[in-house]
Image (cartoon, rainbow, N blue to C red):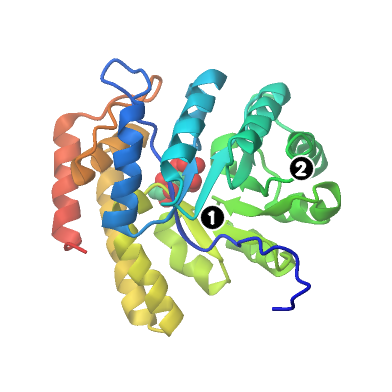
Amino acid sequence: MSIMAPAAEKNVTGLVAATFTPFTPEGELNLSEIGPYIDYLTEKQGVNSIFVNGTTGESMSLSVPERKILVEEWCQKAKGKMDQVIVHVGCMSLKDSQELARHAGQIGADGIAVISPSFFKPSTANALRMFLQEVASVAPTLPFYYYHIPAVTGVNVTARDVVEGIEKLIPSFRGVKFSGSDLMDFGQCISYSRPCWSILYGIDEQLLAALALGAHGAVGSTYNYVGCHINRLLSDFEKGDLIQARKIQFKLQELLLFATKLGFDLGVNKQLMNEVSGLNLGPPRLPVMPCPPDHALSIAQKYYSIFSEC
Ligand SMILES: CC(=O)N[C@H](C=O)[C@@H](O)[C@H](O)[C@H](O)CO
Ligand SMILES: CC(=O)C(=O)O
């Protein structure tokens, strides 16, 4: 690298765990689990980056003050242990998003991501870009990621339309967390992406297809408990061993298919994490329902029958 190169900014690569928010049994934040959670990810799963207060973290069910308290704890406990802490700051209100973006910058997050508002939905890619630009503008030095999750937001604009030319509107733009199954649109984001961007895939059960299209990394909920296996999928893919990589992808598909038949949702996902990790992340918050204990147990048994110890 040239001696004149600007200070290196890290691209996001590899696996990023979308963290669950720890609650007490009464439904309050349980900050004391965050340190052990980070140690579990690094030591047991080999996962060194986190995406906090996203979908899995139930951000839209948290108050703005709760989101700030969580981010402070995640950033503090991750210091020296995690490569990247990316904070989702999207809200229905532009003002709330800006407040969280500013806060993330002040407390040393490595990047911020924003989901489209979904009550009043932007009707065009341009309206969405204007919203993203207003959020990014209050934290202009923080790497900014657009979080594309159309099945949840119901906002039907392609990510490619959102990112085209966005570097002129948002100089801090650094990539997309793409949680959609439209692989054509995903490919078009990769093909447009700039060298300093990271295009991260977010549907864990089809990661291998996204890798073939050039995904730089992946953000997902299942990397909380299958990270060490999916790390092997990544290295098999890099070696060109597609047969092994597929075997691992199919195992994750088998687990999720089994779980889906029992009604896989965030409550079940969180309880599966509790079972597998031994952490006490508690129940989800309403309207997400807690997982029936027998469902979590049978999914955990399936997990152990599919995946051996790492
Ligand atoms: C809707 C949702 O939460 N998607 C997650 C991330 O984007 C994924 O990690 C899924 O939880 C995962 O792919 C299992 O379906
Ligand atoms: C899965 C994911 O990326 C999220 O929880 O936001």
Q: Quadrant of residue 33?
A: top left
Total numbered circles: 2
The x, y position of residue 156, in whole percent, is 67, 42
Towards the viewer: 40 or 207: 40
Residue kind at label 2, given as amino acid type:
Pro
User: 282 and 262: which one is in front?
Assistant: 282
Label 2 sits on a secondary structure element that is loop
- Is label 1 within 8 A of ligand 1 (CB to nearest ligand atom)? no
Q: Quadrant of the N terminus?
A: bottom right
Question: Which residue in the structure is indicated by mark 1?
Answer: 181
Q: In which quarter of the image is residue 108?
A: top right
The residue depicted at 37 percent of the width and 78 percent of the height is 236
Residue drawn at x 74%, y 34% as measured from the top left? 135
In the rendered structure, the answer to whether residue 47 lies left or right of residue 113 reads left
Name the residue at 46% across, 29% down: 70
Residue sitting farthest toward the front: 3
Q: Could you tell me which quadrant the C terminus lies in?
A: bottom left
Q: Residues within 10 Å of mark 2 (few under 14, many from 20)?
A: some
Of all residues shown, which one is farthest toward the bottom?
A: 240
Furthest-top residue in this view: 26
In the rendered structure, the answer to whether residue 195 lies left or right of residue 290 reads right
- Mark 1 vs mark 2, foreground winner is 2
Q: Distance between the residues labelled 1 and 2?
A: 30 Å
Q: Badge 1 local density, few (<14 within 10 Å), some, or many (20+)?
A: some
Sequence-wise first label, 1 or 2: 2
User: In this rendering, does residue 54 appear at all?
Assistant: yes
Amino acid bearing label 1: Ser
Q: Residue 277: x, y in percent?
A: 22, 45
Residue pointed to by mark 2: 140
